[in-house]
Amino acid sequence: MARKIIIDTDPGQDDAVAILLALASPELEVLGLTAVAGNVPLPLTARNARQICELAGRSDIRVFAGCDRPMKRELRTAEHVHGKTGLNGYDLPDPQTPLQDTHAVDFLIDTLRAEPPGSITLCPIGPLTNIGTALRRAPDIAGRIAEIVLMGGAYFQVGNVTPAAEFNIYVDPEAAEIVFKSGIKLTVMPLDVTHKALTSRARIEAFRDLGTAVGAAVAGWTDFFERFDIGKYGSEGAPLHDPTVIAYLLRPEIFAGRFVNVEIETLSDLTRGMTVADWWGVTDRAANATFMSDIDAESYFALLTERLARL
Ligand code: BDR
Ligand code: CA
């Protein structure tokens, strides 16, 4: 039986590839996409999510708009990385599918209450505002979530949006704190993982060589945002962050990490949104997250190419 997932997302080119990977994978049943403000404001993430589903020929996937700003902070966006629309690099037609009327937070709560406990995995790949708000409003859902597998945080890589913090956690640290303190089974794909799986010319051309609209879109998007990371890090390519979450559901054996304590810094202006991971076990704080550190990059890109070819 396919594993039921909800993808909480702020597309974003790498979010788009994550969504496409999920839609291409029969092991997963996508119950819906919940859009959140992040890389770009909510009206754009909610629009982009529908465009991506339509690109995959899956206008049946329901898209719910969620929170338009973090729980306690001003929204910080990332057009400098993702472009004005969030999906710069390959233009998609206007979406034909309407947004769902229900707010994403209500959809999350209602669905988790309606489905059998332990049957739904949440896959957040943006700021954690929708999930944090749902847990705050309906604490009973915590015990009904099978697992949360998220992209966010960093330990050895420390930060990308500030010297100390990764974007998704930085944008809404209060929401992240709720998630990390929830007691829900948590698996984290931090920058430490994603920076070990960089794009390369050959990997991007493999997408383009699929000869499909999906292949052209993914190649166009990765080409676009690559320029930012290459300029910043002087690396050969760019990390493709968010699809690691979906790849983990499909091929957990290509990842390695440790079950450790991870706390979120919410008080300091200097290190706001830092994921303080007790990697070396120097405290007696209880472990609460499987914090990944390694990925077999060849297998990851092979999986992406093989799956995207199915769309
Ligand atoms: C994360 O931030 C966003 O810009 C990406 O989509 C990814 O989810 C990486 O820090
Ligand atoms: Ca994202």
Image (cartoon, helix red, strand yellow):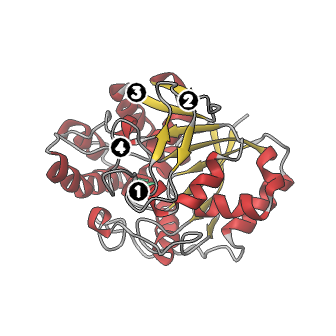
Q: Is residue 144 left or right of residue 243?
A: right
Residue at 42% x, 30% y is: 293
Q: According to the image, label 4 marks what residue?
A: 158
* Position above or below: 118 against 302: below
Question: Mark number for residue 283?
Answer: 2
- Distance (Cα) linking label 4 and label 2: 19 Å
Residue at 46% x, 55% y is: 273
Task: Name the mark nearer the viewer: 3 or 2.
Answer: 2
Q: Is mark 1 within 8 Å of ligand 1?
A: yes
Task: Name the mark nearer the viewer: 3 or 4.
Answer: 4
Q: According to the image, label 3 marks what residue?
A: 294
Question: Mark number for residue 167?
Answer: 1
* Position above or below: 257 against 86: above
**Quick one: label 4 or label 2, which is nearer the N terminus?**
4
> What's the residue type where badge 3 is placed?
Asp
Residue at 50% x, 78% y is: 43
Residue at 48% x, 55% y is: 169
Residue 301 vs residue 278, the one in the foreground: 278
Indicate the secondary structure of the residue bearing disc 2: loop
Ligand 1 occupies quarter? bottom left
**Quick one: label 3 or label 1, which is nearer the N terminus?**
1
Residue 108 is at least partly visible in this image: yes
Indicate the secondary structure of the residue bearing disc 3: strand
